[in-house]
Image (cartoon, rainbow, N blue to C red):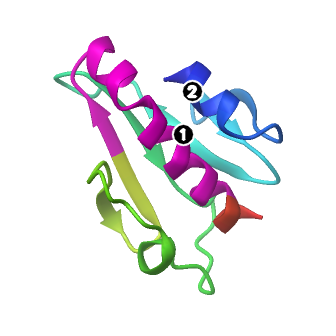
Amino acid sequence: MRRIILDADPSISEGIKWNAPSFRTSEWFATFHLRAKGGVQVILHLGAKKRPDANPRASIADPDGLLEWLADDRAAIRFSDVDEVNARGPALAALVREWVGEVR
């Protein structure tokens, strides 16, 4: 998942934020949920502060149904194993590119 996220857009970098591997462009936008049960999970968000002008739920297409919306500005993506990550990698990369567009 890490490689798919990093390769989705050249402006993405990584670091540790909130004690977990996280990804950023101009703002932190994705953080691994290290205590997720039953697989690996990444939370897509718009940084530490709520942005009243942002609503990715209304604008991001999810034709593969990967997003579990936690709020209008936050969603989770969960994969049960590495085979699922590999199979759904292109859909994950497409969502990350769209999400990065919301962060900028």
Residue with the mark numbered 2: 4
Q: Is the Cβ of the residue at disc 1 closer than 8 Å to that at disc 2?
A: yes
Give how far across and how far down residue 6 sits, in percent. 68, 29
Q: Please, is residue 13 above or below residue 45 in the view?
A: above
| Range covered by the magenta-colored residues | 77-100
Residue 62 is left or right of residue 9, and the answer is left
Q: Quadrant of residue 85?
A: top left
Amino acid type at circle 2 is Ile
- Could one spot residue 20 in this view of the protein? no
Characterize the magenta stretch by its predominant secondary structure: helix
In the rendered image, residue 13 lying in the magenta stretch gets the answer: no
Which residue occupies the foreground of this view, 1 or 17?
1
Identify the residue at image location x=48%, y=68%. 60
Left or right of 98? Residue 27 is: right
| Residue at image coords 49%, 77% | 59
Is residue 8 visible in the rendered structure shown here?
yes
